[in-house]
């Protein structure tokens, strides 16, 4: 990169700091810090939900998949998410917003004590916090790899630099700063992504038709919907996991819906995110698919997208592209840190320290910022050790994606009245069965990605659904009343 690229990147960081300061002026309580006071516009929530669905890992780990296996990346990743989000849009998203309106929750796990019981809530809260350490750690590692490819900066230094910037921005501005950064990141990424696609098509020399004829220059398998380890079973398993993850099993997605003014707003936000997942990756991934045409036999395919950008983008826009990658990663890590802090502050801390539940709002806000800081610091340590967990792709797919299912099943299905008979015992057995299955697959079939992804969530689903069908225990009246109340917005019921 040249000076103009560093100037553009520095300008982005300055804007990021300003966003944090602006967010700080809007925050008066922990409710503002965690859920924007329930005033998040649906269009901003939808864009934020989409952007916080991927980070720099897309341009690193997924770029390597596109380079090695081709179009299958869109099929099993983007298309699977879009299909899964249809269920999220109509079944789950509105219920999160109604939960906040009816019970004043600020964290996704806050309702679990009433839905199940306190021990179940604590197990799910602690499990989710631990799982997220690995996921966010992978995102820091990916941005370190990108910085290394663009600037030559050591990966560990890149992780440290981005971590320090993020800690300041996240702890200062809360959710408001995060969603505004999501919006700005998407605009930057849109401009850079369109330009990148146009430049690649120009170099292919066939105009717009190059979108279709390019595949003739690639190995035949690259145009197949399923290729290599990415089989139909893998794609279906990933789709099921995505339903639970993007519905709120990955907690920062739930926060986008919780922060919406009403259930109808949350539904529109989810619908917008669905449309973006269906269309935008076709543009974003195109240079990744085309990379083998221009760059042969890359020693490290994780750097393929960065090498394509260095090859085709003019200086200035190169810095803008890197800024968009930073924006995605910081937006996603900020979203995670904000939500995990809410879970720790609202659900875990009051159990460990009884007086925390009665803290003054200003003191609670200080605690919120402190827990956010400590969580980000812990994820940075994981990032430095990412190689011990199979690298970025290993952390995202082999660890996070496999482990998120068992904890998400009772959280998401627990919002639906048809599963009211699945109580605390079903929830705990579902989590335990899924996690034990995850451990078993790691020990006995560590190289089978499809089974490693499918088995844990399948076991969890069977246990939880069986309890709903055959359960004969008494249903908690308060849980049943809560579930029935989430069917429609308050104003619609009036």
Image: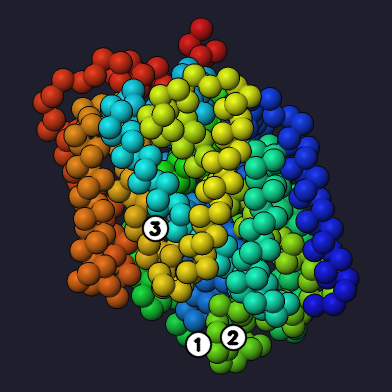
Residue 410, which numbered label?
none
Q: Is residue 358 above or below residue 44?
A: above
Q: Is residue 142 above or below residue 335?
A: below
Q: Is residue 210 above or below residue 469?
A: below
Visible in this render: residue 276?
Answer: no
| Marked residue nearer the N-terminal end (3 or 1) | 1
Q: Position of residue 253 (x, y in %)?
A: 51, 42
- Sort mark 1 into few (<14), some (14-19) or many (20+) by Cα contacts within 10 Å: some
Distance, label 2 to label 3, CA atoms, is 28 Å
Residue 292, which numbered label?
2
> Quadrant of the rendered structure where residue 328 is?
bottom right
**Labels 1 and 2 touching (C-beta < 8 A):** yes
Visible in this render: residue 460?
Answer: yes
Q: Position of residue 452 (x, y in %)?
A: 29, 65
- Name the secondary structure under disc 2: helix
3 vs 1, front mark: 3
Distance, label 1 to label 2, CA atoms, is 9 Å
Q: Is residue 19 above or below residue 280?
A: above
Picture quarter with the N terminus: bottom right
Report the residue marked by disc 3.
Answer: 401
1 vs 2, front mark: 2
Q: Position of residue 444 (x, y in %)?
A: 20, 71
Relative placement, left or right, of 123 versus 475 is right
- Residue found 55% across the figure and 84% down from its top: 300
In this view of the protein, which residue sits in the foreground, 412 or 338?
Answer: 338
Residue 219, which numbered label?
1
- Name the secondary structure under disc 3: helix
Distance, label 3 to label 1, CA atoms, is 29 Å
> Quadrant of the rendered structure where residue 189 is?
bottom right
């Amino acid at each position: 990169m040249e000076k103009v690229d560093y100037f553009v990147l520095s300008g982005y960081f300055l804007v990021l700091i300003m966003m944090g300061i602006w967010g700080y002026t809007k925050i008066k309580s922990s409710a503002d810090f965690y859920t924007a006071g329930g005033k998040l516009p649906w269009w901003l929530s939808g864009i934020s939900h989409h952007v916080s669905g991927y980070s720099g890992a897309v341009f690193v780990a997924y770029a390597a998949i596109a380079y090695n296996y081709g179009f299958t990346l869109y099929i099993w990743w983007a298309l699977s998410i879009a299909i899964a989000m249809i269920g999220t849009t109509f079944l789950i998203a509105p219920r999160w917003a109604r939960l906040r309106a009816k019970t004043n929750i600020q964290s996704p796990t806050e309702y679990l004590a009433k839905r199940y019981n306190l021990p179940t809530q604590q197990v799910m809260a602690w499990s989710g916090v631990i799982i997220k350490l690995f996921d966010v750690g992978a995102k820091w590692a990916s941005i370190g790899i990108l910085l290394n490819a663009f600037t030559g900066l050591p990966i560990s230094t890149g992780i440290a630099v981005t971590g320090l910037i993020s800690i300041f921005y996240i702890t200062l501005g809360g959710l408001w700063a995060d969603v505004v950064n999501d919006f700005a990141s998407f605009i930057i990424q849109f401009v850079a992504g369109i330009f990148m696609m146009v430049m690649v098509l120009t170099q292919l020399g066939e105009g717009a038709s190059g979108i279709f004829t390019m595949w003739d220059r690639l190995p035949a398998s690259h145009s197949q919907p399923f290729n290599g380890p990415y089989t139909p079973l893998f794609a279906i398993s990933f789709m099921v996991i995505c339903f639970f993850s993007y519905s709120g099993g990955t907690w920062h997605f739930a926060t986008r819906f919780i922060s919406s003014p009403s259930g109808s707003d949350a539904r529109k936000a989810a619908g917008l995110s669905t449309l973006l997942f269906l269309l935008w990756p076709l543009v974003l991934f195109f240079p990744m698919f085309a990379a083998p045409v221009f760059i042969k036999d890359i020693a490290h395919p994780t750097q393929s997208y960065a090498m394509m950008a260095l090859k085709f983008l003019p200086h200035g826009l190169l810095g803008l592209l890197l800024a968009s990658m930073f924006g995605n990663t910081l937006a996603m890590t900020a979203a995670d840190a904000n939500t995990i802090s809410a879970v720790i502050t609202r659900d875990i801390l009051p159990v460990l320290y009884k007086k925390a539940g009665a803290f003054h709002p200003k003191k609670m806000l200080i605690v919120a910022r402190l827990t956010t800081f400590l969580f980000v610091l812990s994820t940075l340590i994981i990032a430095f050790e990412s190689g011990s967990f199979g690298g970025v792709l290993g952390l995202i797919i082999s660890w996070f994606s496999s482990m998120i299912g068992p904890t998400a099943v009772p959280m998401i299905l627990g919002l639906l009245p048809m599963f009211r008979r699945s109580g605390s015992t079903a929830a705990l057995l579902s989590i335990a069965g899924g996690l034990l299955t995850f451990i078993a697959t790691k020990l006995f079939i560590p190289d089978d990605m499809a089974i490693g992804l499918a088995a844990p969530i399948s076991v969890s689903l069977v246990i939880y659904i069986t309890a709903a069908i055959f359960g004969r225990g008494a249903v908690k009246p308060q849980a049943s009343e809560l579930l029935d109340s989430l069917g429609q917005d308050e104003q619609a019921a009036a």
